[in-house]
Image (spheres, rainbow, N blue to C red):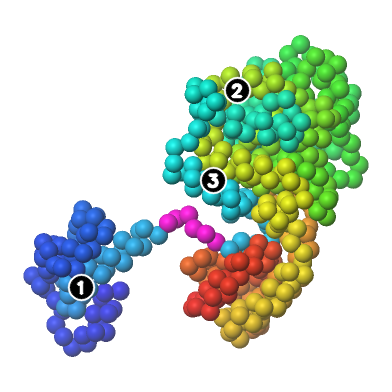
């Protein structure tokens, strides 16, 4: 960079010499240097300037150093730019226009504002995390949400850990260590990010006993697998695939009956774990946690940040005596949640007490239930803006499309939506042009994440709420390249 600008700014001048380079002390002692040091800290400025001066020395030796690059203000402003670039957070807000509402790679559920406020407060003020305000004694952090979870699920007791993978691991280690767990072959799931039932089982110290076949499992398969070392029967939600065609699975009620006949508990890893029947909002049907408990499950585990719409967490609800064992297991201490999670979880769970208000107040449900007509209107407004930004090389259209719930919730169901499709206007090389465009959008100050399919880049507007639309449009009016 400097070499090129040197030849550009001083086509005829002599390159600068190493002896022309100002000393570190002079830079730090200058008025601008002192101001910058007060802002970023003297030691950090010193380190950055040393690197810049070292580079200048090498350039001087190579005869490529321009005198203009040695102005005190120029050197200090380079240092400032470098420090600012380093300070750019790596975790950044993006626009999720992928059409997948609960996108694991983009952080899954978004929290409602009042839950965010609760997190901010928990961060900045001491809180009664493990302190019983009525007795003044030490408390249990689970107490903050246990009653609420029991009320919403009908379970006797509840506890919470870092995520559902942790919940399954802990539950198995606490209740099935060195013993056998019976699972249908049709339910040996792998969830993205290397959560695999057989592996978790092994790490938990439990022995997996597979029953049935991939497509069909019968009650007798479970019965025949029971023996003196059996600890429990486990059902796992087929979160990210569907077994269709010639199939047969055994219901939670049937599995629970078989388990109970033999004095064993039945556990269910429900994955998403919805608390209310989603069909009332026109969404596909999914067994709720309460229904699963009512069907006879003794332990149910589920995620906090999938359909529930809360923070990342693993919720474990069920019979009091089993939850007690789980809480006493040393792994519980290792997998427990922090106060930020609890601060966010409580207000989200509390929303479920008012089902009529949920589709408005719970961000995940609001996004999932947005009518396609809303996204259609947005697409009509944004089409000219994006077309203008991209120029004649691309053709932007308002297009109907389908969103997905995501995160292993209802994997094959799709929600009618609307968005923008972008095609390359020229002939040939359209694949490359779309990839280039996709990358340009990813490099924006607030990156825009879409998806490429069928020779077009698709931007699903479901997750662009009205309050974000103006800022989104404004960004497109800046340089998109
Ligand atoms: C998503 C899922 C998990 C993992 O849950 P995390 O909260 O992501 O750890 C485990 N089991 C099932 C069935 C799931 O769908």
In the rendered structure, are the residues bearing label 1 and label 2 in contact, judged by CB atoms less than 8 Å apart? no
In terms of secondary structure, what is the magenta stretch mainly?
loop
Q: Secondary structure at mark 3?
A: helix
Residue 475 in view: yes
Instruction: Name the spot of residue 338 as percent of width and height, x first.
Output: 51, 36
Asked if the beta carbon under badge 2 is closer than 8 A to the nearest atom of ligand 1, the reply is no
Extent of the magenta region = 89-94
* The disc label shown at residue 212, or none: none
Residue lying furthest right: 246
- In the image, what residue occupies the spot 52% across and 45% down? 119
Residue 308 placement (x, y as % from top left): 69, 44
Q: Mark 3 highlights which residue? A: 118
- Answer yes or no: is residue 428 visible: no
Who is closer to the viewer here, 22 or 229?
A: 22
Pointer 1 or 2: first along the chain: 1
Is residue 373 part of the magenta span, yes or no? Answer: no
Q: Quadrant of the N terminus?
A: bottom left
Please, which residue is most extreme toward the front here?
134
Badge 2 crowding class, 10 Å Cα cut-off, few under 14, some 14 to 19, many 20 or more, is: some
Separation of marks 1 and 2 at Cα, in angstroms: 61 Å
Residue 327, disc: 2
Tell me the quarter of the picture where residue 304 sits.
top right
Residue drawn 24% across the image and 55% down it: 41
> Marks 3 and 1, Cα distance to the nearest angstrom?
45 Å
Does 178 appear above or below 277? above
Instruction: Tell me if 5 is positioned left or right of 377 in this view.
Output: left
Q: Quadrant of residue 314?
A: top right
Residue pictured at 51% horizontal, 32% vertical = 129
Could you tell me residue 91's position as x and y percent?
Answer: 48, 54
**Label number found at residue 73:** 1
Q: Look at the numbered discs 3 and 2 and tell me whether their residues touch, using CB distance below 8 Å.
A: no
In this view, the residue farthest toward the left is: 19
């Amino acid at each position: 960079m400097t070499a090129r600008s040197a030849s550009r700014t001083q086509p005829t001048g002599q390159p600068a010499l190493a002896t022309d380079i100002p000393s570190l002390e002079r830079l730090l002692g200058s008025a601008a240097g002192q101001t910058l040091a007060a802002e970023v800290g003297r030691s950090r400025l010193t380190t950055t300037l040393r690197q810049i001066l070292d580079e200048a020395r090498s350039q001087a030796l190579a005869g490529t150093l321009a005198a203009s690059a040695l102005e005190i203000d120029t050197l200090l402003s380079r240092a400032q730019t470098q420090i600012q670039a380093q300070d750019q957070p790596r975790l950044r807000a993006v626009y999720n226009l992928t059409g997948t509402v609960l996108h694991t790679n983009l952080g899954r559920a978004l929290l409602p504002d009042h839950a965010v406020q609760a997190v901010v407060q928990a961060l900045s003020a001491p809180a009664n995390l493990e302190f019983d305000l009525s007795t003044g004694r030490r408390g249990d952090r689970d107490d903050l949400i246990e009653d609420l979870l029991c009320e919403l699920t009908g379970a006797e007791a509840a506890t919470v850990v870092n995520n559902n993978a942790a919940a399954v691991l802990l539950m198995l280690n606490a209740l099935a260590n060195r013993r056998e767990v019976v699972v249908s072959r049709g339910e040996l799931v792998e969830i993205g990010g290397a959560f695999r039932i057989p592996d978790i089982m092994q790490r938990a110290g439990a022995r997996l006993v597979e029953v049935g076949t991939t497509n069909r499992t019968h009650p007798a398969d479970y019965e025949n697998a029971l023996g003196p070392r059996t600890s429990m029967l486990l059902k796992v939600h087929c979160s990210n695939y569907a077994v269709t065609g010639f199939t047969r699975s055994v219901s939670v009620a049937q599995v629970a009956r078989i388990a109970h006949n033999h004095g064993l508990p039945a556990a269910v890893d429900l994955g998403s774990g919805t608390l209310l029947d989603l069909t009332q909002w026109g969404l596909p049907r999914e067994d709720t946690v309460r229904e699963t408990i009512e069907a006879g499950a003794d332990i149910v585990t589920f995620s906090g940040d999938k359909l529930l719409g809360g923070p990342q967490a693993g919720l474990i609800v069920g019979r009091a005596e089993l939850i007690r064992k789980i809480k006493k297991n040393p792994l519980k201490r290792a997998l427990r949640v922090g106060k930020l999670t609890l601060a966010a979880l409580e207000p989200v769970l509390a929303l479920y007490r008012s089902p009529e208000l949920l589709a408005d107040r719970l961000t995940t449900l609001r996004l999932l239930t947005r009518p396609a007509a809303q996204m259609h209107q947005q697409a009509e407004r944004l089409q000219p803006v994006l077309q203008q930004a991209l120029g004649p090389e691309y053709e932007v259209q308002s297009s109907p499309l389908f969103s997905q719930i995501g995160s292993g919730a209802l994997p094959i169901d799709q929600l009618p939506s609307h968005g923008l499709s972008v095609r390359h206007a020229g002939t040939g090389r359209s694949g490359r042009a779309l990839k280039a465009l996709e990358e340009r959008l990813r490099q924006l100050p607030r990156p825009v994440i879409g998806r490429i399919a069928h020779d077009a880049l698709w931007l699903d507007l479901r997750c662009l709420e009205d309050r974000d639309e103006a800022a989104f449009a404004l960004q497109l009016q800046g340089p998109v390249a």
